[in-house]
Image (cartoon, rainbow, N blue to C red):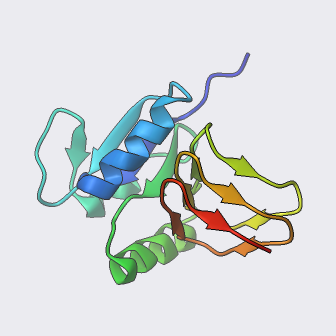
Amino acid sequence: MQKLKSIIVLGAGEHGNVVKNIFKHGRRDIFFLDDLVKSTFVLGKLSSYELFSSNKYDFFVGIGNNLLRKKWIVKLIQNRKNLVNAIHPNCYIEKEVKIGRNVMVGANSYINTNTLIGDGVIINNSCVIEH
């Protein structure tokens, strides 16, 4: 079985930690980049993302501020980093749903058929999105 890549989450605040908890269900190694928060899991500042190879790491922008999240998503895409989605195992997504990159879907959420979810969307716990 192929080992999943480690994940670098940009932003170690509240939203970043919610995302970390979702990724823990997949038993991946999770690290952060953050300009303000200091901890053993913070590997450096946000701008140091370039130091981490896409061969070893997937990326997720876990910044709650919509404008900053969009800025970093665009920057990572332009620099060919692989953005992954954080989808809680206790949610249900119909097969006909199209989901962009860097999307978070929280626990107990439901996304109904023929829905289009764009890049960087946050769907918090227990949300229902209809067609």
Horizontal side, residue 46 vs residue 111: left or right: left
Residue 76 versus residue 89 in the image, above or below: below
Residue 51 in view of the camera: no
Give percent across and percent down for residue 66.
39, 79
Which sits in the foreground, 75 or 34? Answer: 34
The residue under the point 10% across, 45% down is 38
Determine the residue positioned at 49% across, 37% down. Answer: 23
Identify which residue is drawn at 33% across, 68% down: 64
Quadrant in the picture for residue 99: bottom right
Q: How many marks?
A: 0
23 left or right of 128 in image: left
- Residue 79 position within the rendered picture, expressed as x and y whole percent measured from the top left: 52, 67
Task: Quarter of the image for the N terminus: give it.
Answer: top right
Looking at the figure, which quarter contains the C terminus? bottom right
Question: Which one is nearer the viewer's eye here, 25 or 32?
Answer: 25
Pick whichever, 2 or 105, lies toward us. 105
Q: Where 8 falls versus 41 (above or below)?
A: below
Residue 123 in sight here: yes
Q: Is residue 75 above or below residue 19?
A: below
Q: Looking at the picture, how far across and down is residue 86, in whole percent?
A: 55, 49
Q: Position of residue 69 (x, y in %)?
A: 40, 73
- In the image, taking residue 80 as reference, residue 49 lies left or right, namely left
Residue drawn at the location 25% of the way across and 51% of the way down: 12
Q: Quadrant of residue 43?
A: top left
